[in-house]
Image: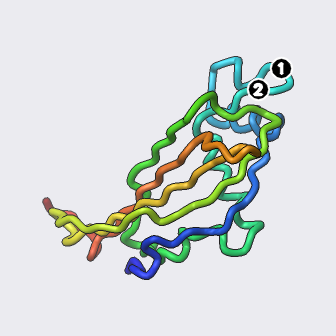
Amino acid sequence: MVDRRADGLVGEAFELDVERGKVREFARSVHAADRAFYEGDRPIAPPTFLTTAFHWELDVDGAAIWERVAMSHERGMHAEQEYVFHGPPPAAGDGLIARSRIESMYEKEGRRGGALTFVVMVTEYRNAGGELVAEARMTGVETAKPPTEEG
């Protein structure tokens, strides 16, 4: 069951280095065709590259806040992911400072599993000058009970 005490929680800031080799590896792993993800000394990071932040936040105590939501592994799921860029996408060589927050928690009535609890986490990515470069918005949903197989 979702822990409502996590609503509004803000994690500690953590660094995300956009590394040339990692950008290329990530682009290959998602079968990205755009040559801008592979060429030159500063290849552009594919938009979904920011998901790798989940690896980086583990190095800083208090940065990984999603676990504090305590969403059920049996009834929870990743419902939506959105990336918003406030200028050019990050490129190899960029150093970003990221920080996640639980933006909202709300409920809707579901058809098969009873009430649905939605949790939205936003991770902001800022450059060395503190300017907002990008945001990742992740929505998870948990059903009140396991869905049934019929209708």
- Which quarter of the picture shows residue 56? bottom right
Amino acid carrying label 1: it is Gly
* Quarter of the image with the N terminus in it: bottom left
Residue 55: percent from left, percent from top: 71, 58
Viewed as shown, does residue 98 lie left or right of 115? right
Q: Which residue is mark 2?
A: 43
Q: Residue at x 71, y 52 (%)?
A: 97
**Front-lying residue, 29 or 5:** 5
In the displayed structure image, the side of residue 20 where residue 135 appears, left or right: left
Residue at image coords 53%, 77%: 68
The answer to which image quadrant residue 141 occupies is: bottom left
Is the Cβ of the residue at disc 1 closer than 8 Å to that at disc 2? yes
Q: Is residue 117 above or below residue 79?
A: below
The residue shown at (77%, 66%) is 59
Residue 9 lies, with reference to residue 78, above or below; the image says: below
Nearest the camera: 56 or 30?
A: 56
Q: Position of residue 69 (x, y in %)?
A: 47, 74
Determine whether the residue tagged by mark 1 lies in a helix, strand or loop: loop
Residue at mark 1 to residue at mark 2: CA–CA distance: 6 Å
Above/below status of 81 relative to 108: above
**Horizontally, is 46 left or right of 61 in the view?**
left
Residue sitting at x 34%, y 64%: 118
Which SS class for mark 2?
Answer: loop
Quadrant the C terminus occupies: bottom left
Instruction: State the image coordinates of residue 122 (x, y, percent, origin top left).
Output: 50, 56
Reading the image, the residue beneath label 1 is 40
* Amino acid type of the residue tagged 2 in the rendering: Pro
